[in-house]
Amino acid sequence: MNDPRLWFGPKRLGWGISPRTWEGWALTGLIVATCIILKRAT
């Protein structure tokens, strides 16, 4: 379980970071889904 891959890494163009592994994409999807659910609840 000692996997050295980073979930997020630098973008190829522009500023910031972007998902690099399926775990990073899953976390990004979870954050987006949470924001959508919270927005609909208000």
Image (tube, rainbow, N blue to C red):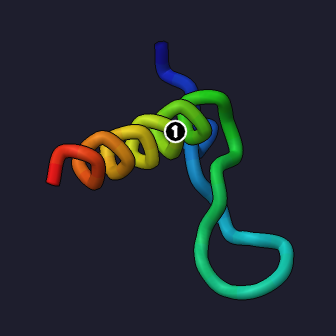
Q: Nearer the viewer, residue 4 or 16?
A: 16
Residue type (three-letter) at the residue carrying disc 1: Gly
Residue furthest to the top in view is 1
Residue furthest to the right in view is 12
Q: Nearer the viewer, residue 35 or 3?
A: 35
Q: How many marks?
A: 1
Pointer 1 residue: 29
Q: Nearer the viewer, residue 7 or 1?
A: 7
Residue 9 point in image, percent of width and height: 64, 60
Q: Residue at x 67, y 36 (%)?
A: 21
Q: Residue at x 42, y 36 (%)?
A: 30
Left or right? Give the position of 10 relative to 29.
right
Left or right? Give the position of 30 relative to 39.
right
Left or right? Give the position of 31 relative to 19.
left
Residue 4 point in image, percent of width and height: 58, 35
Residue 12 point in image, percent of width and height: 84, 73
Q: Nearer the viewer, residue 21 or 3?
A: 21
Does dot 1 land on a helix, a strand or a loop?
helix
Reply above or below: 12 against 24: below
Q: Residue at x 28, y 54 (%)?
A: 39
Q: Residue at x 15, y 54 (%)?
A: 42
